[in-house]
Amino acid sequence: MQPLLTTRRGFVRGTATGAVLLGASGLTGCRRTAAPGIPMIPGEHSSLSDHLGFFSVDEPTIARVMAELTARGADAADLYFQHSRDNSITMEDGIISRASSSVDQGVGLRVVVGDQTGYAFTEDLSLAAMLAAARTAASIAHGGKVVPPVAYSHGQAASYYPLTQPWAEVGVTQKLPRIARLNALARAADPAVEKVTVSWADGEEAVLIVDMHGKIHTDLRPMTRLWCMVTAKKNGVTQANSANLAARQGFDWYTDERLQFVAAEAVKRTMILFEAKRPPAGELPVVLAAGASGILLHEAIGHGMEADFNRKGTSIYASMIGKKVAPDFVTIVDDATQPGERGALNIDDEGNPTEKTILVDHGVMASYLHDSISARHYKHRGTGSGRRESFRHAPLPRMRSTYMENGPHTRDEIIASVKKGIIAETFTNGQVQIGAGDFTFYIKNGWLIEDGKITAPIKDINIIGNGPEALRNVTMVANDTKLDFGGWTCGKDGQSVPVSQGMPTTLVSKMTVGGENV
């Protein structure tokens, strides 16, 4: 049960004009101060008063709102203040075709009683609007009144994504040479390249989380992504493919070496399609390439290990804690503590510290991913996995950076062991039934293996299977684990959050491959 209050009184409290001015100021280059009406986001080491002042609230205001939120009783309650700024630029055929800036701000108010959650949000941070939202969220509660804290303390957090220069200080005139350089690199890589599109995105998000026990947590979260799409034509045939980089990093992360890498990767993925064929259809061994194949691990297996699906009995893993689910050499983790990664988090969206959570420990199911509600239900310590898309949403147990750890084999040993099969290299999309773990994934690039050797490129393949079954059918895992460098976004219950994923080269003994009937 989640009653919602959708009070919308303009774009940001600083007025919509501020958002327009921010977009305009971005076109003038780098500057220290923000546009009129839009304050600078507090830095990583700013004081609590700076963070409170940024959202135009103080401790008495927070105490009043919390008292209203918990007036009818609460097992847990929190306020989630969020301010986000996002910028994007697109270059097509060497010309800037689009550029935009956006600002969003508001607060989400949550009260939890047993298994019920009352949630409301408002974009208006006036006391009257927040009190109205608090009353709406509290309408589900029935119990003794909670005494709100009279004083608040600022919790300390890790620092996995410090910046030398905040994105708010980086102007378009600094970004344009990097965008143009990537465009030129991709165009020069092969004479068959006809069109190059480069998309740049950057932003930062300030959050302030207040709980009913008097703790205040703050975080400043940067994000950036650079995408290169290439279209090439040979002998009347057109092919297209892309590559992208994403991370919680700053402007200086975009070195010339990284620009060269993404250009080369986009062109390589495109040009190999002219040679590639569809493989024979049927049940075949599938080698999951290191890195991007983590999407299968994430979707077909990871979601089933999120605690809410198990608490409701909809996951196949609901009764599997402590049981064997994979070979002894398989260990799967979800880790928010990797510096600069897209899925890294200093704190989760409930203010809890994050960690490296072992989900499968040497083949044995070890833990679910918990938010505060599921941790309380299972009487389990939290894992710092409560995440939400924005202040408009209540948190859910979510993955952060999910990957398989190194195994005892090598990539060459794995390929040599396959008489006839495929390598799945780059994935574009797929569908998964969370409960049972049934999946279908579309592979854009791959390779055919015959008699232990890579013989030909393949393309446009579907692989079909079941996540838990595929996990049991893992027969070899290499020692080359890595996270994919692309910008993955995970969707669940209508919410999207940034994630990382990866794995080592892994052999699954059999999957259904949708190729050509021969």
Image (cartoon, rainbow, N blue to C red):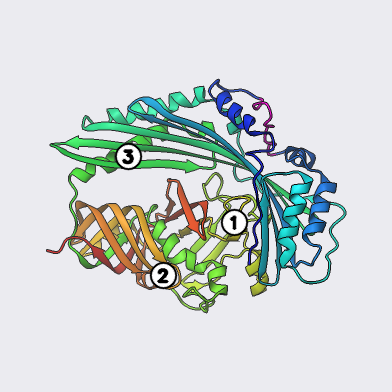
Mark 1: amino acid: Arg
Query: Residue 137, percent across and down?
Result: 71, 60
Tag 3 residue: 266
Question: Is residue 126 or residue 477 the one in the foreground?
Answer: 126
Q: How much space separates mark 3 and mark 2, taking CA atoms?
A: 31 Å
Looking at the rendered structure, the kind of residue marked 2 is Gly
- Name the image quarter holding the C terminus: bottom left
Of mark 1 and mark 3, the one earlier in the sequence is: 3
Q: Which residues are magenta?
A: 33-44
Q: Residues within 10 Å of mark 1 (few under 14, many from 20)?
A: many
The number of numbered badges drawn on the structure is 3
Q: Residues within 10 Å of mark 3 (few under 14, many from 20)?
A: many
In the shown orientation, is residue 103 left or right of residue 330?
A: right
Residue 91: percent from left, percent from top:
39, 29
Q: Hey, which residue is sitting farthest top in the picture? A: 28
Residue placed under numbered mark 1 in the picture: 387
Q: CA distance from mark 1 to mark 3?
A: 32 Å
Q: Main secondary structure of the magenta part?
A: loop
Q: Residue at x 48, y 56 (%)?
A: 491
Contact check, label 3 and label 2, Cβ < 8 Å: no
SS label for mark 2: loop
**Which element type, helix, strand or loop, lies under badge 3?**
helix
Please determine whether, in this image, residue 391 is positioned above or below residue 231: below
Q: Earlier in the sequence, mark 3 or mark 2?
A: 3
Dot 1 lies on which element? strand
Task: Give the amino acid type for the residue marked by disc 3 in the picture.
Answer: Ala
Specify whether residue 170 is painted magenta. Answer: no
Q: Residue at x 50, y 22 (%)?
A: 173
Q: Is-magenta flag for residue 42? A: yes
Q: Which residue is mark 2?
A: 437
- Is 77 located above or below residue 162 in the figure? below
Q: Residue furthest right?
A: 150
